[in-house]
Amino acid sequence: MKSPLYELIHSLSKSEKRYFVLFCTREASGGNYLKLFNAIDTQAKYDEAAIKKRFRNEVFVRQLHVTKNYLFKLILKSLRNYHASLSKDAELKDLLRNVEILYNKELYHQCGKELHRANIIAVKHELYTGKVEIESWKRKLTQAQTPHDYESMTAIISTQKTAIDALQSTNDQWRVAINVTNGMYRQYNNISVRNVRLKMPAQAPTLEGRVLQHNTQYLLDLRNEDNPSAERRLTELITLLEEQQERITEEPGLYVSTINNLLSFYAFQHRHDDALTLIRKAKSIYESWKITAANRTLLKQILRTYNIELELYRDTKSFNHQLDFIESTEKFVNENLPKIPKDYLVSFWFQLASIHFMRRNYGRSLEWINHILNARFKSVRADLYVQAMILNLMIHLDQQNLMVLRYYVDSTKRYMKKVKYAYPYLDVLLKFFVRMGRLPVFEYKQAFKELKSDLYPEGEETLIPKEVRGYIDFKMWIAIREGRE
C-alpha cells in the first residue's frame, strides 16, 4: 500500500529537499524527523517494517504514526516557505496572514498597509476570493478604529458584494462549461445548442470567466459543426490572452491550453501548415518562460504542444523538412529532464527515436531507444516498451548488427512473456527478425515482401491492432526495404 508521506517525499525536487534539510535543522526536534525523512527518501518503495527495524532503538519509533503525521506537516510547512513567491495568489495569502497577526496585536496602521498591498494584487490579478476576505478585514479595521463610520463600512460592504458577484458569475460559467463538456462526451445528441447559449451568463466580469465563455462557445460550435466559428472563438481567445501579458506570465496555463486546443483543431482539420506555424510561435513564447519543477501541470501542457508537433511531422512523413524542429525539441527535453514525468519522458524518447529512424539517422535513433531500454521505469506501459524493443530490432537490422539482433530478439521474447503481452503480429515480426539474422543480404528483398503479405494480407484486415498502429509505420519501413537490393 502506498504511503502519503512516501509519495510526498519522492515528489520533492532536489532543491526542495535541500531546503527541507536546512528548514528542519532550525526546528528544535528536527533531528528525528530528518532521520525519518532520509530513510524514506532512500527507499525504492515504502517499507514500514524496515523503518521500524532500522530505528528500533529510537524513542520516536514507538509512536511512528504520530511522527509520520508531523513530518508530513513539517514538509508542507517548508514547501509553503520555499514557494512563498510561487504565484500572486500565494503572495496574497501570505499578506492576509500578516494582516491577521497585525490586527490581533492591534497594530492597525501596519495592518492597513498590508491590506493596501494585498488589495493591489487582488484587483490587478482578479483574485476575487482574496478580495472578499480583504473587504472583511477592511470592515473589521474600520470598526476597530472608527466604529461609527457607517458610510465607510457601507461602501466596503458594497465593494465586497461586487467581488462576490464576480465569483458567482465565474461559478455560473463553470457550471455551464462543465455541463457542455459532459454533454459533448456522454450525451452528445441531447445537447441543445440554443438552450445552452440562453443559459450562459452575460459578458463575464473576469478574465477566467471570459476564457470559459470562449471555450464553451467553441465546444458548442463544434457540436453545431460550425468549424469557421469554432476556429474564430479560439483565435479571439488567444488574442485576448496575449493582450494580458502580465496575466499570461502569472497564469501561463490558460494560454498554453488554448494554443493546444487550436492545434488539435488544426490537426483534426488536416491543416498541418497552420498548426506548425502556430507551434513555432508558441515555442518562441515558451522559451522565454522559466519553467519550475513545482508547476508540473504547466510543464505537461507545454509538453503536449511539443508532442503534437512530433506527431504532425510523423503523420505527414515530412521528417526532412524544417530540420531544426527535432533539435529544438531534444534541447527542451534535455533541459527539463528532471522535471518531466516519466511516462511523458518515455513517450518523447520514443517519438524522437522514431523520427530519427525514419530519417535513417540510425545512430541518433538508437541513442533515444537506449534511454528507454536502460531506464527501466516501472511506470512505463508495456505496449510502449514493447514498441521500443521492436524499433530497437529494426534499427539493428538496418545497421546489420546481426549478432546483437539475435540477443535482442531473445530479450524481447522474455519481456513479452514476463508481462504477458502477446499479439499475432508480434509473433510474425519476431520470427522475421530471427530469420533475417541468418539470411543472406541478397534474399532480404523477398523476405520483406513476405513480411508485408503476412502483416497486411491482401483483401483482409491487417494483423496490427488499431491501438498500436500509430507507434511504428511498418508499411513505410517495408516499402523502403523492398526497394533495396
Image (tube, rainbow, N blue to C red):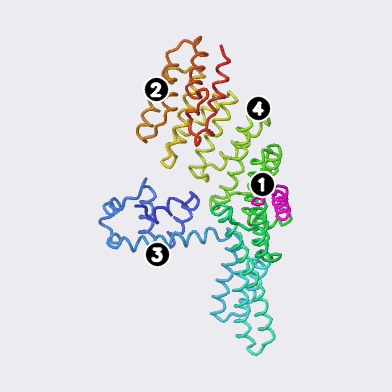
Q: Amino acid at mark 3?
A: Ala
- Compared to residue 444, the image places residue 280 above or below, namely below
- Inter-mark Cα distance, 2 to 1: 45 Å
1 and 4 marks in contact (CB < 8 Å) = no
Please provide percent x and percent y for residue 32. 35, 59
Q: Is residue 30 left or right of residue 469?
A: left
Residue to which mark 1 is pinned: 262
4 and 3 marks in contact (CB < 8 Å) = no
Q: Is residue 347 left or right of residue 40?
A: right
As drawn, the label of residue 28 is 3
Quarter of the C terminus within the rendering: top right
**Residue shown at 57% from the left, 67% from the top:** 93
Specify which label sits upstream in the sequence, 4 or 3: 3
- Inter-mark Cα distance, 1 to 3: 54 Å
Specify which label sits upstream in the sequence, 2 or 1: 1
Please provide percent x and percent y for residue 6. 39, 53
- Inter-mark Cα distance, 2 to 3: 57 Å
4 and 2 marks in contact (CB < 8 Å) = no
- Inter-mark Cα distance, 4 to 3: 62 Å
Please provide percent x and percent y for residue 341. 50, 45
Instruction: Identify the secondary structure beneath mark 4.
Output: loop
Q: Amino acid at mark 4?
A: Asn
Q: Mark 4 or mark 3, which is nearer to you?
A: 4
Q: Amino acid at mark 2?
A: Tyr
As drawn, the label of residue 320 is 4
